[in-house]
Amino acid sequence: MEARSASVHDLVILLNAKSNNGSTALHIAAENNSKETAELLILHGTNVNEKDKYERTALYVAAGNNHKEIAELLISHGADVNAKNIDGVSVLHIATKYNSKEIAELLISHGADVNAKNIDGVSVLHIATKYDSKEIAELLILHGANVNEKDKYGVAPLHIAANNNHKEIAELLISHGSDVNAKDKNEFTAFHIASKNNNKEFVELLISCGCDICVKDKGNHLYLNDNHKKCQEL
């Protein structure tokens, strides 16, 4: 009996042994999409929520690699769908970054926070906007994501859409109540950003949605010569 207890103890230690970067065998199985290995590890008691040195869980790794079956397996055995890495990046953030819609749906269906923010205040919707993941943006908004959420610099998703000229996502955001006159900490609006980047169609979209073309930034600057004349006329 003592020998058996010792062997079980040794097995548990081995299952949760870590590499130099803190990865466990389960992290590696998740990265390599090795479902059978993951099942075996879980069967023998490995901790599904163990974190590496960057505080990433196996579910985080699976989401970042779009390994849905592994993600389903981990969640079914208690993996934390709201786990975050050392920078506050959630599993849903990373699934969104890599446009893994099915995993995003899976996470949300199991209670993932659609308004999760990293240490810089960047929300999942900020990430969807940055990487032009329109379908995930729609999914997030459908489940209550705040379209006017701001990061620590005062940047809203619409600012990001303007900076990257992601017009379709901008239309989506605006149709769900995004403030077209929202200002960041430098008092830049989406109109300022689109104008500076010479994104004519984006500027036209904002104007058609009622943005203030005469608003000035923190440096007291106006943007777009054609619209300066309109401001002077006003």
Image (cartoon, grey):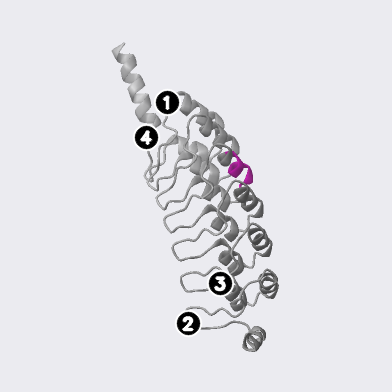
3 and 4 marks in contact (CB < 8 Å)? no
1 and 3 marks in contact (CB < 8 Å)? no
Q: Position of residue 185 (x, y in %)?
A: 46, 70
SS type, badge 1: loop
Q: CA distance from mark 4 to mark 2?
A: 55 Å
Q: Amino acid at mark 4?
A: Ala
Mark nearest the camera among 2 and 1 is 2
Give the mark nearer the N terminus: 3 vs 4. 4
Q: CA distance from mark 4 to mark 1?
A: 13 Å
Locate the N terminus and report the quarter of the image it occupies: top left
4 and 1 marks in contact (CB < 8 Å)? no
Q: Which residue is mark 3?
A: 189
Q: Amino acid at mark 2?
A: Gly
Residue at 62% of width from left, 88% of height from top? 232
Instruction: Between residue 179 and residue 102, name the one nearer to us.
Output: 179
Q: Position of residue 228 (x, y in %)?
A: 62, 86
Q: Is residue 103 magenta?
A: yes
Mark nearest the camera among 3 and 4 is 3
- The image's mark for residue 45 is 1
Give the mark nearer the N terminus: 1 vs 3. 1
Q: CA distance from mark 1 to mark 3?
A: 52 Å
Give the mark nearer the N terminus: 2 vs 3. 3
Q: Residues within 10 Å of mark 4 (few under 14, many from 20)?
A: some
Q: Position of residue 37 (x, y in %)?
A: 51, 30
Say whether residue 59 is left or right of residue 66: left
SS type, badge 3: loop
Q: CA distance from mark 2 to mark 3?
A: 13 Å
Give the mark nearer the N terminus: 4 vs 1. 4
SS type, badge 2: loop
Q: Amino acid at mark 1?
A: Gly
- The image's mark for residue 17 is 4
Q: Which residue is mark 2?
A: 219
